[in-house]
Image: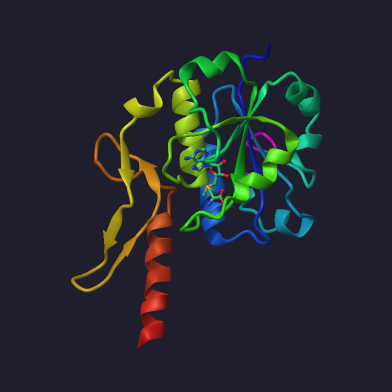
Amino acid sequence: MESSKKYVVEHMEDGIFPWVKLEYLAVSRDVGGGSKFFLTSLKPELYASLPVELQDSRVVTTTTEEVIMLPGLQQLANQGRVCLLDPGAEVDLSPGDAVNFDYYVFGGILGDDPPRDRTGELRRYGFQGRRLGVKQMTTDTAIRVTKMIIEDQLKLNDIEYVDTPEFRWNKHESTEMPFRYVKDKLTGDPVMPEGMRELIRNDANKSFDDFM
Ligand SMILES: C[S@@+](CC[C@H](N)C(=O)[O-])C[C@H]1O[C@@H](n2cnc3c(N)ncnc32)[C@H](O)[C@@H]1O
């Protein structure tokens, strides 16, 4: 059994949107200290538009191949040692799972409301499914929570969350994010990738302008 944990994001969007880049950058900063981050199914043209940090093989292993093609992964999957974080799974991830799995696989999917179950496309590999509760998390949040459960041995329900945060930009304008985030212990704010708030604000401004 390997001790270092491996977090794989199977990229499932056609493009790499600014949101996704910020999420992947946040994951690359979170995953460290002996753990590894893999970005799979990345089309070659997308690789070129990755932020430089994500082109550094010391930070992340990127590949155009599907997750199942990672060296040794099929064999580990056959042994039941690959976990798919799947909102449709019946069993929640628990600290005890740290000894069960070497790889944790996530869908590189933008959140949608209501969720369209695109994670379901990854079920064909036969990985062991685990859920992180019923609320939809962003991909970087799902990885953050998985790390807290697996590496810090916290229970899913002992982690503090912020659900559906609302960002108020001024008296008249606000944006609600229909996802679950980890609560920052110091500020009480949802933990989000650096630059995400600004991006949400810019997107909101664009849609407010559309109404003008
Ligand atoms: C934004 S979510 C996508 C959920 C989505 N709407 C769908 O179509 O499946 C991105 C990824 O984070 C992970 N994830 C998010 N919330 C989760 C939950 N409550 N339980 C398990 N995994 C979750 C899954 O790996 C999922 O593919």
Q: Is residue 41 above or below residue 204?
A: above
Residue 171 visible here = yes
Side of 162 where 92 appears, left or right: right
Give the quarter of the figure containing the C terminus.
bottom left
Image mark count: 0
For image coordinates 58% across by 50% down, the residue present is: 117
Q: Position of residue 8 (x, y in %)?
A: 64, 36
Instruction: Single out the residue that lies furthest toward the top.
Output: 1
The residue closer to the viewer here, 74 or 92, is: 92
> Which span of residues is magenta-colored?
53-60
Q: Is residue 17 above or below residue 61?
A: below
Give the quarter of the figure containing the N terminus.
top right
Instruction: Single out the residue that lies furthest toward the bottom.
Output: 212
Residue 53 visible here = no
Side of 30 where 41 appears, left or right: right
Instruction: Single out the residue that lies furthest toward the front.
Output: 90
Q: Quadrant of residue 124?
A: top right
For image coordinates 33% across by 25% down, the residue present is: 158
The residue closer to the viewer here, 19 or 75, is: 75
For image coordinates 51% across by 33% down, the residue present is: 131
Q: Position of residue 171 (x, y in %)?
A: 18, 71
Q: Quadrant of residue 156?
A: top left
For image coordinates 46% across by 58% down, the residue present is: 113
Residue 52 lies in the magenta stretch: no
Q: Position of residue 87 (x, y in %)?
A: 52, 40
Q: How is the image coloured?
A: rainbow
The residue closer to the viewer here, 147 or 76, is: 76
Q: Is residue 103 above or below residue 53?
A: above
Q: Is residue 180 above or below residue 128?
A: below
Q: Main secondary structure of the magenta part?
A: loop
